[in-house]
Image (cartoon, grey):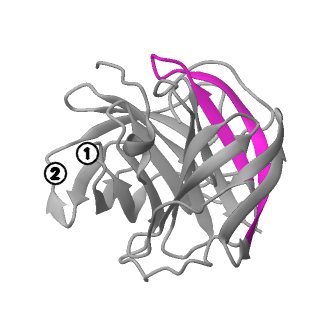
Amino acid sequence: MKRKTLVLAGMIMVLLALLLGACGSDSSTPIAINPLKGTWYGTLWDSNGVLRTITVTVENNNTTSSVLIDNVPSGDYYTIKKAAGYTGIYSATESAGTRGGFFLDTKGKHLVFVDALFNFSVMQKGATGLPGFSSTDPAGSWSGYEVALDSFFDITETFKSSAMVTYTSTGLDISGSNKYGAIKGDLKGQQDLNFGLYSGTMTSPVPAKAVVILTPDKAFAGGVDCKVGGLFPEDCTFSAWSKQ
């Protein structure tokens, strides 16, 4: 796949931060999760920047038996494997060969999916619809973990992070920390309250464009933030955060 330079227009739709197969281990990866088996539902930000609903059914043998986009069968199927050395992180290879992966939360109730075509989705097990969202829904205390990838979609590192999102008269402000220092930024960019998507700008640890998507229960957020002028996916981090 031709790698593309990320620009603001390509990031219409993070933070809260979702992934793939690879090597190594890290003590900050999530533990004690439930299996992937089940039906997952949520929001998809597709490779064309269009927001859709997605339903994925994973069988006991870690293959997908159904992938519905806007309730229509997509014809895509995935073979899923646990990422060696990690808990809750799975690689996923689409039937046409596109690489991607899943990040689960520690309870196995929510996950994030991303692939090499920049399809990005955040899903909840057993959910059946989107509830409608408000501008204040991301406000609160969040914690979880982040994943960094190389250009081959292999994991380079995972690390813990946390943040407080505060709703002010000018919008949503973010402050927190990860292994690289203070997290500072906002989610004052484009929002889509039908799909639970919020975007903004990070100023620390590095200047970046950020996108966050909430699950239907609003208890989990998956995010991606990419360095200004950087490349996807190696200049991005993917996040899986639970509300505290």
Residue at screen point 47% across, 65% down? 125
Q: Above or below — where is 26 with respect to 36?
A: above
Residue closest to the eye, 108 or 115: 115
Residue type (three-letter) at the residue carrying disc 2: Ser
Q: Secondary structure at mark 1?
A: loop
Quadrant of residue 119 within the rendered picture: top left
Q: Left of 128 or right of it: where is 137?
A: right
Amino acid at pointer 1: Asn
Q: Position of residue 50 (x, y in %)?
A: 28, 55
Tell me residue 222's x, y (percent).
56, 54
Q: Which residues are magenta?
A: 144-166
Q: How many other residues sit within 10 Å of disc 1, few (<14), some (14-19) or many (≥20)?
A: few
Q: Is residue 227 above or below residue 58?
A: above
Q: Residue furthest front?
A: 170
Residue at image location 62% in from the left, 46% down from the top: 239
Q: Is residue 101 left or right of residue 149?
A: left
- Quadrant of the image occupied by residue 126: bottom left
Which residue is the site of mark 2? Answer: 74
Can see residue 61?
Answer: no
Q: Circle 1 is placed at which residue position?
A: 48
Q: Is residue 181 visible?
A: yes
Task: Please state if 222 lies on the left or on the right of 65 as rendered.
Answer: right
The vertical placement of 130 against 96, above or below, is: below
Which label's residue is closer to the chain start, 1 or 2? Answer: 1
Q: In this image, 228 relative to 176: left or right?
A: left
Q: Residue at x 41, y 52 (%)?
A: 12
**Chief secondary structure of the magenta portion:** strand
Q: At 81% across and 33% down in the image, what residue appears?
A: 27
Q: Is residue 206 magenta?
A: no
Q: Residue 217, image x and y in percent?
A: 54, 76
- Image position, residue 178 (x, y; %): 81, 41
Secondary element at tag 2 = loop
